[in-house]
Image (cartoon, helix red, strand yellow):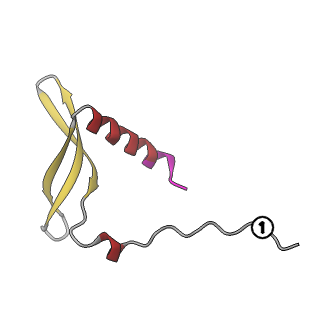
Amino acid sequence: MIPQPHKDNFNTLHRAFDDGAACLLECQELATGKPVYVICAVNRRGEEFELVPFATLFSDNPYDLLSPPLEPADDRRAV
């Protein structure tokens, strides 16, 4: 089950894309200094913009890095 804060962040990001208030930003990973590409929501406060990072894009093949969720256990019992 996906935790509610992650669902809330996803919904915020979804609204940002719908409103045209999302961007892709090049940053540097603190540990390595390598470039990473971050999906951000853009908040505008008067003349200032605040970029709120939500996710990084994969540099490698995500299928090699992740496994799908496990299937729910079959709850039916043999009779």
Q: Residue at x 55, y 70 (%)?
A: 70
Q: Residue at x 23, y 50 (%)?
A: 39
Q: Position of residue 29 (x, y in %)?
A: 18, 64
Is residue 61 positioned above or below 38 on the image? Answer: below
Q: Magenta segment, which residues? A: 1-6
Is residue 62 positioned above or below 19 on the image? Answer: below
Q: Position of residue 30 (x, y in %)?
A: 18, 64
User: For the residue marked with disc 1, what is the amino acid?
Assistant: Arg
- 9, 79: nearer the viewer: 79
Q: Residue at x 27, y 39 (%)?
A: 17
Q: Position of residue 75 (x, y in %)?
A: 74, 66
Secondary structure category for the residue under label 1:
loop
Residue 4 within the magenta-colored segment of the rendering: yes
Q: Residue 77 falls in which quadrant of the image?
A: bottom right
- 77, 41: nearer the viewer: 77
Q: Residue 73 falls in which quadrant of the image?
A: bottom right
Q: Residue 21 falls in which quadrant of the image?
A: top left
Q: Residue at x 14, y 50 (%)?
A: 25
Is residue 69 positioned above or below 20 on the image? Answer: below
Q: Position of residue 66 (x, y in %)?
A: 38, 72
- In the picture of the structure, the residue carrying the numbered disc 1 is 76
Count every numbered label the image shows and give the total: 1
| Residue sitting at the far top | 46
